[in-house]
Amino acid sequence: MSDGFRFDRPGLDELAAALETLERGFGGLPRADDDVDSAAVRAALLEAASRMRDNYPYFHPLYAGQMLKPPHAVARLAYALATWINPNNHALDGGRASSAMEKEAVAELARMFGWDAHLGHLCGGGTMANLEALWVAGRLASGKTVLASSQAHYTHGRISAVLGLPFEEIPCDRRGRLDAAALGRRLARGDVGTVVATLGTTATGSVDPLPEILDLQRRHGFRLHADAAYGGYFGLADNLGPEARAAFDRIGEADSIVVDPHKHGLQPYGCGAVLFRDPSVGRFYKHESPYTYFSSAELHLGEISLECSRPGASAVALWTTLRLFPLERGGAFARRLASSRQAALDLHARLCADARFVAAFEPELDIVVWLVRAPRLSECSARARRVFDESARRDLHLAVAELPAAFFNLDGSGIERDRETVACLRSVLMKPEHREWIGRIWERLDAAAGTA
């Protein structure tokens, strides 16, 4: 790139030192040489590197589009270190150390939500984690309806179909949050087994009103699942608005929680986590396999997950990262989250002060959405796509999202509402350095809007 970007490389020395430590643990074994042709390996790697250049710069602060965040160097290195062993965390025989590390790391995630007793494990990502949470919910309320907001991740509808559970959407308010009054009206009709509360929607980062949903739970007795795949870590941040703060302060009252360490948790894909407040739901996972593993009578992770083979390297990477970044308020990790939210607030303020744009509601986490002003909403959509293209030509990578027009205050804007949805620009400012880069991001957005 023009500014001389380079990937960080000093960590390779640390990886070599870690490999030497790992080797010494197996020093008593006879040598077993790999049949490796170094020249062929180098050629294949260089070819792969050339192919990988056909990517957006997801790792750079000027990439501010989708939910893509580079793993921390320590996570990359720990993951690579573990691949020399290549443990399988399905059973203790396949991943003895990494299974223990997974249990410890998951316990730290649970404590972040205020849980000491819990059942949980890592999985491939939020989709699989939500599948397990709804699968347990379905076992407890067979055949009953699952409810989620119209801005909840689309995976909940698909998962419910896979599980044979009825699924219905509940409308959102003008800030992209589940409408508690609409939820109450639907609950009054009965036959609801589970309500999904989203703490950090994919499109806008909105946080559903968890205190109101918990009040409804006490009256109607449904199971409450918190999909915090994106926003789960934000409970550690010290600069949330009062409503988001109130929701995160009570997330521990949910029956199950999903969080994705491969989003804000600094991990490589795929690393999701599902947690249950009541450990006794482990009874639904119980199974017998005649060919699995019998060298240990201790509970293994394969007995509390739907997935079988799972990469122990993910657990090693997360465990190692947590040594560097404990999950504590006021700590270095929490400050990174606060920085991302502040970046979103800074960009939102600039948008609100510029007549060329119409910003949506104030961001609750670190996602910002805005319109590019035009006489009609249909023209706003077309102009947003032009700004998107012009921004990319300036190495600023945003995203385009189709959202309800109701998310934008168009009263007195002079914009004709000729459609109910509008294509708008969306920016996910999830890298901690985004706060320092807002000025440069704005310069490129300003230039792009001037030519679109």
Image (tube, rainbow, N blue to C red):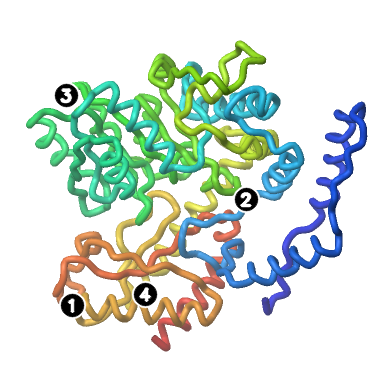
Amino acid found under the numbered disc labelled 3: His
Measure how far apart labels 3 and 4 are at the Cα level: 46 Å
Q: In which quarter of the image is residue 283?
A: top left
Task: Tell me whether the residue at label 1 lies in contact with that at label 2, contact meaning CB atoms closer than 8 angstroms.
Answer: no
Pointer 3 local density, CA inside 10 Å: few below 14, some 14–19, many at least 20: some
Residue of label 1: 414
**Closer-to-camera residue (230/35):** 35
Which mark is nearer the camera, 3 or 4? Answer: 3
Residue of label 2: 71
Q: Position of residue 66 (x, y in %)?
A: 46, 61
Measure how far apart labels 3 and 1 are at the Cα level: 44 Å
Pointer 1 local density, CA inside 10 Å: few below 14, some 14–19, many at least 20: few
Task: Tell me whether the residue at label 2 lies in contact with that at label 3, contact meaning CB atoms closer than 8 angstroms.
Answer: no
Which mark is nearer the camera, 2 or 4? Answer: 2
Q: Which of marks 2 and 3 is nearer the N terminus?
A: 2
Residue of label 3: 220
Describe residue 219's horizontal placement relative to residue 159 as left or right: left
Q: Which residue lies furthest to the left in this view?
A: 189
Measure how far apart labels 4 and 1 are at the Cα level: 15 Å
Q: Position of residue 376 (x, y in %)?
A: 19, 79
Residue of label 4: 354
Amino acid found under the numbered disc labelled 2: Pro
Q: Which of marks 1 and 2 is nearer the N terminus?
A: 2
Query: What secondary structure is marked by label 2?
Result: loop
